[in-house]
């Protein structure tokens, strides 16, 4: 990173030095330069406009309309939002998404960090561990989810078989309202933890060894070194991944869609799942869009708050 | 990044580790972790493979068998033919490679223009592109779907065609961010020298910028291929025809129709290409993870 900054600073220097004696190029040349630049930009700008910027606007517009596939639209004011407010599924969907996100913080967030800290101490079989932990990330998520659905089967599923073998109490997993969300989180942690673990490992390897030595000379034990050296040194990446994870888990869809089908009793119908149901089961694009808009505002607000907090912390 | 083996000091001091007690503890932990990782991450693959070999009766037997008592290779053949896996794998490959091509051409050109040619309002465009990073993609699935269903101005329906995957994949703010940041680090003098030699912007991009940008192009390529291979919600919406579906969507559609042992065999076959891709590009994938803009 440092080398890049040096190069950039040098580039800036020579740029300004070169710019001073030279006069502004003539208008025709500037027009030509701009035209060429816009030609380079055209493909990406068109794609962004059609598949990103326009849909953002359309999301807002749609949430105040009644619309269908054919494109007939009528303005309905706040009616889509009112519909949401009276739909009991709206509230259970938020509950499901938030519950999923919170459990995912307990497992999905803590586990990769702990695993990375432990792996970073090992001097053997390092590439084996990395390979293993990243393997599920590289599976098609639908294939992995179906496999876990068999694992979770209360009758002849692998998990209950192992528990029975160890004479431990078995669980209904996805089929009980008490354990369905946690079951989804366990799968989600398993399939995603490779990414976090490898990112943390890289961050841990960048901690200068002298810091640990200094802490040790001052008599800091293992846990104080962990608390006063390891965690502060990885704070930036920890907080960034925290933010990214919350935003990602609040959009959970595949796990409940494949593993539990939103059940039992609508317990795992998350917000994005409900958007999908509104649009493609009840043909109610308006309420789907309205729900999407609320989720968008919540998550964008969350992201903005994170940026603001991290900037304030950097300045302080 | 510190090289893996030359690291000197971590949380636990070398002195602690070299004591007898430290050594015993270290080897005990290692002896527990090696099989534990295999059990957690490798065993599911074993279960898929052996589940695919079992007979229809054995696969639903309770308690399950730990290895197939009757080996039926025919399940894999059935999965391949009856479930049309070749079609699904081919589709996904075509979508992934096409998305990669479009992203490399359009996003690289755009990032180059924004970084080196700096047109009027370039910063506004850059801001608008990066701002999309704040908008979660799943939330926009609905309006984007309607847009693809009936494209503005042209009024064509892109669903069930590769374009529905290829073109939206270009609208990727993270790619633009990664590429522009990398291009910014290429010294201006190099391009100025090329301009003096009479090289136009395209020539400068092709023979100076791109050869220097191999690492970041590798990162972007791997990200884009894996993204298409792993995506679920978007292909579920836009690829409804069985002829056009990706692996993920095809498996979902087949899940209720196929016998359990054939379906498990299909899951295993479907997992192979990405795992091979991972084994081949392991180094690049892991380097990309950590250099891909998350550090520094």
Image (spheres, coloured by chain):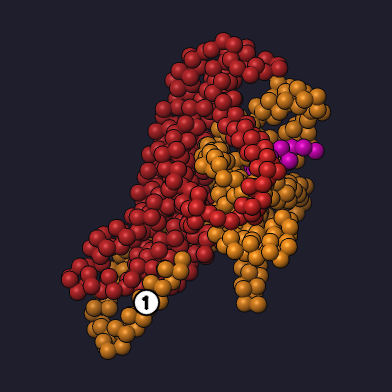
Q: Is residue A126 visible?
A: yes
The residue furthest front is B20
Q: Residue at x 57, y 32 (%)?
A: B42
**Residue A55, horizontal then vertical, whole percent:** 51, 57
Looking at the rendering, which quadrant does residue A12 occupy? bottom left
Q: Is residue A182 magenta?
A: yes
Which quarter of the picture shows residue A17?
bottom left
Within the image, what quadrant is residue B81 found in? top left
Chain ID of residue with mark 1: A
**In-front residue for pair A231/B121:** A231
Colour used to depict chain B in the structure image: red
Residue plotted at (73% across, 62% down): A219
Q: Percent x, y for residue B268?
A: 52, 27
Is residue B36 depicted above or below B14 in this figure?
above
Q: For the stretch drawn in magenta, what is the main secondary structure?
A: helix
Dot 1 falls on a residue whose secondary structure is helix
Instruction: Give the vertical position of B179 relative to B278 (above or below).
Output: below
Query: What is the magenta range?
Result: A178-189
Is B266 on the left-hand or right-hand side of A262?
left
Chain A takes which shade in the image? Answer: orange
**Residue B39 in picture, x, y percent from top left:** 63, 31
Residue located 37% across and 65% down the image: B183
- The residue indicated by pointer 1 is A10
- How many residues crowd around disc 1 within 10 Å: few (fewer than 14), some, or many (20 or more)? some
């Amino acid at each position: 990173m440092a080398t890049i900054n040096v190069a950039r600073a040098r580039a800036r220097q020579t740029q300004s030095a070169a710019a001073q004696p030279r006069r502004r190029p003539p208008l025709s040349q500037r027009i030509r330069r701009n035209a060429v630049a816009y030609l380079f930009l055209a493909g990406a700008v068109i794609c962004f406009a059609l598949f990103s910027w326009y849909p953002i606007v359309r999301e807002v517009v749609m949430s105040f309309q009644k619309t269908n596939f054919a494109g007939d639209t009528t303005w309905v004011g706040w009616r889509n939002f009112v519909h949401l407010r009276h739909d009991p599924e709206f509230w259970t969907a938020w509950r499901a998404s938030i519950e999923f996100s919170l459990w995912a913080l307990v497992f999905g967030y803590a586990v990769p960090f702990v695993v990375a800290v432990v792996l970073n101490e090992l001097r053997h079989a390092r590439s084996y561990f990395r390979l293993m932990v990243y393997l599920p990330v590289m599976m098609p998520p639908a294939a992995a989810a179906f496999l876990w659905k068999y694992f979770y089967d209360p009758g002849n599923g692998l998990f209950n078989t192992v528990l029975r073998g160890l004479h431990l109490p078995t669980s209904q997993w996805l089929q009980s309202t008490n354990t369905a969300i946690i079951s989804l989180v366990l799968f989600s942690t398993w399939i995603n933890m490779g990414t976090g673990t490898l990112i943390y490992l890289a961050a841990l390897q960048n901690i200068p060894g002298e810091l640990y030595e200094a802490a040790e000379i001052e008599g800091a034990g293992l846990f104080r070194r962990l608390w006063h050296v390891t965690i502060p040194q990885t704070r930036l990446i920890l907080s960034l991944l925290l933010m990214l994870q919350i935003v990602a888990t609040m959009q959970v869809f595949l796990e409940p869609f494949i593993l539990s089908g939103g059940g039992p009793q609508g317990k795992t119908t998350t917000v994005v799942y409900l958007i999908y149901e509104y649009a493609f089961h009840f043909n109610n694009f308006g309420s789907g869009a309205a729900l999407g808009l609320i989720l968008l505002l919540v998550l964008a607000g969350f992201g903005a708050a994170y940026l603001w907090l991290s900037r304030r912390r950097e300045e302080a | 990044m510190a090289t893996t083996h030359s690291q000197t000091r971590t949380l636990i001091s070398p002195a602690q580790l070299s004591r007898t007690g430290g050594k015993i503890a270290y080897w005990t932990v290692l002896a527990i972790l090696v099989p534990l990782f295999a059990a957690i991450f490798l065993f599911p693959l074993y279960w898929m493979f052996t589940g695919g070999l079992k007979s229809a009766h054995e696969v639903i037997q309770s308690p399950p068998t730990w290895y197939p008592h009757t080996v039926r290779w025919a399940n894999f053949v059935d999965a391949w033919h009856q479930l049309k896996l070749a079609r699904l794998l081919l589709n996904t490959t075509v979508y992934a490679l096409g998305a990669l091509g479009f992203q490399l051409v359009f996003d690289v050109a755009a990032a180059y223009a924004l970084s080196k040619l700096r047109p009027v309002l370039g910063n506004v465009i850059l801001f608008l592109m990066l701002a999309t990073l704040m908008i979660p993609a799943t939330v926009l699935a609905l309006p984007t779907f309607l847009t693809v269903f009936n494209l503005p101005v042209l009024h064509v329906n892109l669903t069930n065609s590769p374009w529905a995957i290829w073109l939206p994949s270009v609208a990727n703010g993270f790619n633009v961010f990664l590429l522009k940041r990398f291009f910014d680090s290429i010294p201006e003098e190099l391009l100025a020298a090329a301009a003096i030699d009479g090289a136009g912007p395209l020539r400068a991009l092709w023979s100076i910028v791109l050869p220097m940008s191999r690492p970041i192009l590798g990162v972007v390529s791997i990200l884009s291929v894996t993204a298409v291979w792993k995506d679920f919600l978007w292909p579920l919406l836009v690829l409804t025809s069985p002829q056009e579906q990706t692996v993920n969507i095809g498996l979902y559609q087949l899940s209720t129709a196929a016998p359990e042992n054939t379906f498990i065999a299909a899951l295993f076959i479907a997992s192979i290409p990405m795992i091979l891709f991972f084994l081949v590009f392991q180094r690049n994938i892991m380097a990309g993870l950590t250099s891909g803009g998350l550090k520094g």
